[in-house]
Image (cartoon, grey):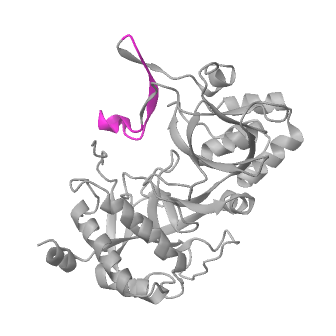
């Protein structure tokens, strides 16, 4: 098994913080936190013992606290205070501090729901593609050269070399035709575009059945923001950029051909695989995501599976609401996913759930925040690893 590449961290500090001093620590009810941590434990226990971790920890230590949780949870009722006791007994919290004031952004993402059909027909003309046969995706070129860290490429081996995969524009003009890659067909190109950005989706069929789609690679081309392109064309002001505003402006003011031209400026394209009517959606750790508890992180700065505490940067107050984008940024979360645009030391994307309401919340969520990492207590680690 190939182990993930972990590059040196940017300049940072860890400041030890008593759990009781975490913003809103006693106010978070932790009911859904239990489910999220169980999924992380399953992931941690599945890893090879030599898997590298950050902040001076290792896989054996994380597997130790995961096993301790399973034993702890079997002997206790799964109540919030029991989980809080587990955290206090086995973990210490540290605030992750950056020397850059710009490096502390938290946003939201969600699982879109789109109407679909299994074959192309009137009203369903936008194909959702599976991964092409033979596509090679290198998610981080830093494994070959540190100066290329954070960059990715994809392509096909031709005559002994890697040739680029087609761009979004080339794909929309038929570059993948005839390969039987169509998983289904959906109604709207703009909705499909945003499903690409989210990296997952739930497709609802006319007969009442449904299926989930999961990210399965990219064409490797650089991502270009649709919002930035609309700003450049004078279609929207920078402070107005949100997913819903982008959709509203394009649909009310632009022709389908012009929308297609704008979308094609982003050469990046995402491929999916079907997971059926499964629990989920599933994050990069291979486990179902939990709304408001699963966080997409930059795996160069936070190891997947780690428990975290997130809070608003400008306040120590707490309000774990699912309806107000100004207050959801607080409480226990766990690193369970990644994202192409999630780069930075104190950077996270909060999974907000499935459907229109979750999408509206995710589209509005953009805040500065503080990030705390839970690390296994040193004395507990030493005792249990002997």
The span shown in magenta is 139-159
Rendered location of residue 39, percent (x, y): 44, 65
Q: Residue at x 22, y 64 (%)?
A: 60
Decide if residue 134 is on the left or right side of residue 254: left
Report whether residue 131 is seen.
Answer: yes
Rendered location of residue 117, percent (x, y): 75, 39
Q: Quadrant of the C terminus?
A: bottom left
Give the residue at the far left of this rendering.
386
- Comparing 149 with 87, the one in front is 87
Rendered location of residue 216, percent (x, y): 51, 39
Report whether residue 97 is seen.
Answer: no
Number of numbered discs present? 0
Is residue 149 on the magenta stretch?
yes
Decide if residue 17 is on the left or right side of residue 311: left
Decide if residue 363 is on the left or right side of residue 161: right
- Comparing 52 with 315, the one in front is 52
Rendered location of residue 194, percent (x, y): 67, 44
Q: Residue at x 21, y 53 (%)?
A: 50
Q: Is residue 52 above or below residue 323?
A: above
Q: Quadrant of residue 123?
A: top right
Decide if residue 1 is on the left or right side of residue 360: left
- Comparing 18 with 208, the one in front is 208
Is residue 32 on the magenta stretch?
no
Q: Quadrant of residue 124?
A: top right
Q: Quadrant of the N terminus?
A: top left
Q: Residue at x 65, y 76 (%)?
A: 321
Q: Is residue 308 above or below residue 249?
A: below
Q: Residue at x 57, y 61 (%)?
A: 351
């Amino acid at each position: 098994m190939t182990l993930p590449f972990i590059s040196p961290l940017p300049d940072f500090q860890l400041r030890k913080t008593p759990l009781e001093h975490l913003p809103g620590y006693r106010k978070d009810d932790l009911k859904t936190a239990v489910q999220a941590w169980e999924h992380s434990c399953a992931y941690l226990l599945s890893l090879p013992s030599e898997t590298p971790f950050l902040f001076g920890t290792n896989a054996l230590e994380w597997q130790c606290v995961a096993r301790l949780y399973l034993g702890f949870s079997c002997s206790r009722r799964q109540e919030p205070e029991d989980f809080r006791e587990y955290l206090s007994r086995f973990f210490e919290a540290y605030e992750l501090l950056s020397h850059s004031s710009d490096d502390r952004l938290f946003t939201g993402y969600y699982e879109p729901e789109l109407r679909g059909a299994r074959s192309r027909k009137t009203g369903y003309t936008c194909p959702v593609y599976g991964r092409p046969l033979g596509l090679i995706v290198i998610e981080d070129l830093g494994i070959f050269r540190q100066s290329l860290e954070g960059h990715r490429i994809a392509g096909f081996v031709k005559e002994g070399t890697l040739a680029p995969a087609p761009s979004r524009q080339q794909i929309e003009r038929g570059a993948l035709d005839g390969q039987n890659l169509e998983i289904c067909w959906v109604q709207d190109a703009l909705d499909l575009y945003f499903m690409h950005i989210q990296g997952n989706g739930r497709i609802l069929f006319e007969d009442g059945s449904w299926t989930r789609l999961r990210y399965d690679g990219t064409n490797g081309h650089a991502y270009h923001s649709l919002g930035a392109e609309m700003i450049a064309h004078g279609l929207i002001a920078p402070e107005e950029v949100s997913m819903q505003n982008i959709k509203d402006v394009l649909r009310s003011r632009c022709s389908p051909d012009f929308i297609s031209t704008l979308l094609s400026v982003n050469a990046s394209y995402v491929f999916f695989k079907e997971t059926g009517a499964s629990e989920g959606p599933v994050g990069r750790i291979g486990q179902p995501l939990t709304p408001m508890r699963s966080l997409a992180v930059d795996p160069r700065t936070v190891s997947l599976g780690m428990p975290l505490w997130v809070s608003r940067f400008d306040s120590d107050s707490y309000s774990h609401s699912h309806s107000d984008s100004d207050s959801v940024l607080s409480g226990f979360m766990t690193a369970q996913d990644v994202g192409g645009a999630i780069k930075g030391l104190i950077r996270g994307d909060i999974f907000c759930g499935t459907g229109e309401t979750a999408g509206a919340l995710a589209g509005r969520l953009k805040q500065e925040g503080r990030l705390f990492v839970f690390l296994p207590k040193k004395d507990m680690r030493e005792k249990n690893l002997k």
